[in-house]
Image (cartoon, rainbow, N blue to C red):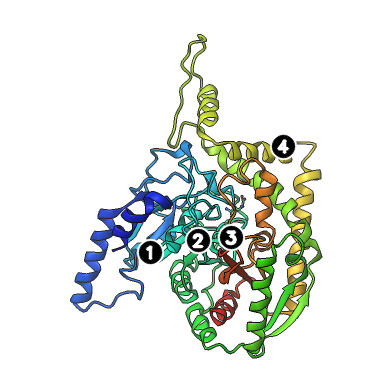
Amino acid sequence: AHLDRIAAVDPAVHAFLHICGRRALATARDVDARRAAGEELHPLAGVPIAVKDIIVTKGVPTTAGSRILEGWVPPYDATLVSKIKAARLPILGKTNMDEFAMGSSTEHSAFGPTHNPWDLDRIPGGSGGGSAAAVASYQAPLAIGTDTGGSIRQPGAVTGTVGVKPTYGSVSRYGLIALASSLDQAGPVTRTVLDSALLHELIGGHDPHDSTSIPEPLPPLVAAARQGALGDLTGVRVGVVTELNGDGYSDGVRARFSESLTLLQQAGAEIVEVSCPHFTYALGAYYLILPAEASSNLAKFDGMRFGLRVTPDGGDGLAATAERVMSATRGAGFGPEVKRRIILGTYALSAGYYDAYYGSAQKVRTLIQRDFAAAFEKADVLVSPTAPTTAFKLGEKLDDPLAMYLNDVATIPANLAGVPGMSVPNGLSDDGLPVGFQILAPAKADDRLYRVGAALE
Ligand code: GLN
């Protein structure tokens, strides 16, 4: 049924870069046979899933939205993919994304944009617009995204889906093509909070293949979601972050946000105001730290090891040295946003500028972590709108990188501090488009997201 749905709507939505129809059907039939034989299976066995194309899948093309990886077929599975396969969820295919997860609209994909199913002239958010659009348009009931600065939560907000960025280190990064290794985290994209909890428990947990993986089990997420669904939040302190609500957020977004605060209060939660003064500098720090890490991570795409190789035609009589192949391959294979960030990153890391830029950004990062620590003394969870506006029109911000970056103001602090965050659907704005409500919790307390999120559903 999902493959039929994909065939019917994906030509207009373009959520998928690659569809694994035969393999998905084979897994589904195998699950049927095992069930018929009375075998005990994982609760999500047989439930189809879509996977963002930045996650490596053995034998299935993986491009990260970039021409430079076109034609590359990974020889191994990411840990989270191995877990999905072991639980026998049919993988429907790989979803579209901004190139190397750089963007907030999926327009930076080298393979054309994804369209928001609510209005095909609008963006589905980014970088994980494909995963969010696939779930929102009923092409997949579950999807996997990655969130380095909001790429799960902001697409969730603008497509009316649930998106979760787990605590840094709680879902293995083994097999994720790295954007910024100290910020990247994979997580669920679903239509309900309980679905996210089920998927999060499946993909999370310690992995010796990832040196930053937390060597502890996850807190009980499904139980927290079930508890929250009962609608009683007595004793839960909800902190409204002053700096993430106000100027720059549209009227419709603010109206839905304050209505949800009333709902939380009616459920017994105590609403408190908290200030995180350094969050104002989060965007600036992020756009130094991310390009710095990305410029280093992307150095491996050299035309020798993966995907595309462009050999200069030699018309100038010069030999095709390794350096010239590398330069031609990177020139042709990377899109403009990727090149912009490599240039920013190498500049910020260069001798003489390192302390002024990268060093300062790291200090800001520490101050943001301290803001979170102080805020979580006063509140059990922090809340804000997920994104400042509803989905904008395709093309509207494409020529203005700064306007594009500003979509991430509310989501970035969580990545800089490693804390978990969730976006839950928060009704529709006056323009008829979905709005997201963001919940943040202390590191390793992801269960709190599920309790509060499920109470809002
Ligand atoms: N919009 C952010 C960026 O462009 C989000 C990145 C992400 O989370 N992958 O960097």
Of discs 2 and 1, which sits in the foreground? 1
Residue 347: which disc? Answer: 4
Residue flagged by tag 1: what amino acid is it?
Answer: Ile
> Which quadrant: the N terminus?
bottom left
At x 29%, y 58%, the residue is 4
The residues tagged by marks 3 and 2 sit, at their Cα atoms, a distance apart of: 22 Å
Whether the residue carrying mark 1 lies under 8 Å from ligand 1 is answered with: no
What residue sits 30% from the left and 75% below the top? 41
Q: Circle 1 sits on which residue?
A: 84
Can residue 442 be seen from the camera position used here?
A: no
Image position, residue 373 (x, y; %)? 74, 71
Q: CA distance from mark 4 to mark 2?
A: 30 Å
Which residue carries the number 3 mark? 154
- Is 421 in front, or is 170? 421
Q: Identify the secondary structure beneath mark 3.
A: helix
The nearer-to-camera label among 4 and 2 is: 4
Q: On the rendered structure, is 362 left or right of 187?
A: right
> Residue 445 sits in which quadrant?
bottom right
Check residue 262 in the rendering and tell me which mark sits there, or answer none: none
Residue under label 2: 172
Name the kind of residue labelled 4 in the image: Tyr
* Residue located at (37% from left, 43% from top): 73
Residue 80 drawn at (x, y percent): 43, 61
Name the side, left or right, on which 436 lies relative to 321: right
- Judged by depth in the image, the label closer to the viewer, 1 or 3, is 3
Q: Residue 340: where, in percent of width, then height? A: 64, 38
Look at the numbered disc 3 and say if its residue's Cβ is closer than 8 Å to ligand 1: yes
